[in-house]
Amino acid sequence: MSTIKSKLENVGDLGEVAQHSRKCQNKLFFAAKPKSLTVNGILKSLRSFAQITGSKSQDRKVMHLQKLLVAAVNEEPRYIIRFVQVFLFAMY
């Protein structure tokens, strides 16, 4: 977490930090690959993300976002994080 915070201070964009972190992440070659992301799949996932409320909702939202980021490739993590940031900013 401290590494992400320090990178965010240097770069200034959480989306770029997410993209760089995803590129540097060790990948297990024997693990099953997640399905490729589609626009409809991302939209459906983000809509269900918005509906999560109640006890332990923050933990469930983090897990939901992690699933999206694990499936993301190339530039996708950057835009997923940026979209979530805009969505959260609009809510508050």
Image (tube, rainbow, N blue to C red):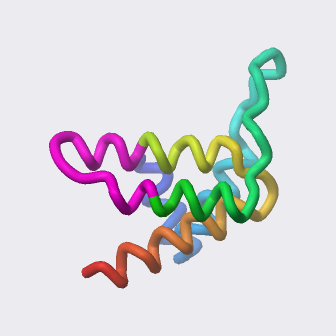
Q: Nearer the viewer, residue 52 or 17?
A: 52
Q: Which residue corresponds to the image point at 68% horizontal and 48% vertical from the top-left?
A: 22
Q: Position of residue 85 (x, y in %)?
A: 45, 73
Q: Tell which residue pokes out farthest to the top in this image.
A: 30
**Residue 69 vertical placement versus 78 (above, below):** above
Q: Position of residue 74 (x, y in %)?
A: 81, 57
* Residue 59 is one of the magenta-drawn residues: yes
* Residue 85 is one of the magenta-drawn residues: no
Tell me how many marks there are. Answer: 0
Magenta part of the chain: 48-62
Q: Nearer the viewer, residue 82 or 36?
A: 36
- Judge from the rendering whether residue 72 lies leftward or rightward of residue 17; answer left or right: right
**Residue 72 vertical placement versus 13 (above, below):** above
Magenta portion: prevailing SS class:
helix
- Judge from the rendering whether residue 38 lies leftward or rightward of residue 16; answer left or right: right
The quarter in which the C terminus is drawn is: bottom left
Q: Which residue corresponds to the image point at 61% horizontal and 49% vertical from the top-left?
A: 69
Q: Nearer the viewer, residue 45 or 71?
A: 45
Q: Which residue corresponds to the image point at 78% horizontal and 30% vertical from the top-left?
A: 33
Q: Position of residue 49 (x, y in %)?
A: 42, 56
Q: Which residue corresponds to the image point at 72% horizontal and 31% vertical from the top-left?
A: 26
Q: Position of residue 7 (x, y in %)?
A: 54, 61
Residue 30 location, quadrant: top right
- Judge from the rendering whether residue 39 lies leftward or rightward of residue 29; answer left or right: left
